[in-house]
Image (cartoon, rainbow, N blue to C red):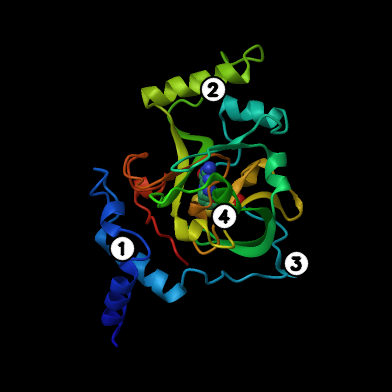
Amino acid sequence: MNRRHFVTAGAAALSGVVVGCDRIAGTSGGGKGLHAAEWVTYRAQRILLGADKLAPEFSESDIAPHFRSNGTGDPPDKSYKLLARDHFQNWRLRIDGLVERPLDLSLSDLRSLPARTQITRHDCVEGWSCIGKWTGTPLSEILTRAGAKTQARFAVFHCADTMEGDDDSGDQAASSEGLADAKAKTAAQTLDNRVVRYYESIDLIDALHPQTILAYEMNGQPLSIPYGAPLRLRVERQLGYKMAKYVMHIELADSFATIGEGRGGYWEDRGYEWYAGI
Ligand SMILES: Nc1nc2c(c(=O)[nH]1)N[C@H]1C(S)=C(S)[C@@H](COP(=O)(O)O)O[C@H]1N2
Ligand SMILES: [Mo]
């Protein structure tokens, strides 16, 4: 079989299993969805990798002495700073959308669930790599508890860090103003459509993959702010920009066409590929 036949035959075989590609491509949601060429990459990678193939794992001696931080290293948002000031005791992870049981989980709730530790290599699209050790809750554990509905096809990660527009770091959110006020302000800004926060999405195959974890520890220590405290995604078979830091909210959806600019992530909306397989 030549390569094209291989890809075509495989894609046909997978089309009933993986995803209703036409729906994800945005035809039902009225959004932009993926380019045709991206679907070829996605399908080919799925065939070649298999749904459960593990990313390589390394040993303690391979851990980078200094792990690079990239993108947001300290979210400017007041609502985030208030959570950080209290060591994330008031932080909650919201899981909703196409689930039977929406969840609000504290860090100690997450720590009481089964955990996985993995030493993996992080590859940034900018051309650098670092090996680090991550401990966290497999996303599958959370999705099992929330009960993903059958229509759910994607997990969308909403983050705390403002990338564009007015964040809520202004002086008016002074110490007398509590978290609730900062949250209200955040909601108002979102309605005004002035704030763009980092977001990402993965399909349910990657969401349920054994190495897809919500990490709260890095190299045996609680995750620090430059690396996405208190919780960041690790999705080890894709590039760094998929690994959302400062995760606040996970939404299960049947399409990402109506989220952000409709291409499935902050960087995807600016031209990066949605499926960033390595
Ligand atoms: N919320 C959020 N997540 C993010 C980013 C970001 O700017 N904000 N940058 C991404 C990019 S491009 C990379 S390479 C990794 C960097 O993770 P690190 O800081 O732990 O190296 O985070 C990704 N996740
Ligand atoms: Mo990156």
Measuring from the top left, give residue 155's x and y in whole percent.
46, 48
Q: Secondary structure at mark 4?
A: helix
In the image, 10 versus 164, the foreground residue is 10
Residue that numbered label 4 is attached to: 140
What distance separates the C-alpha of mark 3 from that of mark 4? 25 Å
Which amino acid type corresponds to the residue marked 4 in the rendered image?
A: Ser
Placement of 152 over or under 80, stated as above or below: below
Q: Is mark 4 within 8 Å of ligand 1?
A: no
Residue 22 found in image quarter: bottom left
- Mark in front: 2 vs 4: 4
Q: Residues within 10 Å of mark 4 (few under 14, many from 20)?
A: many
Q: Is mark 3 within 8 Å of ligand 1?
A: no
Q: Secondary structure at mark 1?
A: helix
What distance separates the C-alpha of mark 1 from that of mark 2? 38 Å
Residue that numbered label 1 is attached to: 39
Which numbered tag is attached to residue 183?
2
Say left or right for 85 vs 126.
Answer: right
Placement of 263 over or under 117, stated as above or below: above
Residue for point 35% across, 68% down: 43
Q: Secondary structure at mark 2?
A: helix
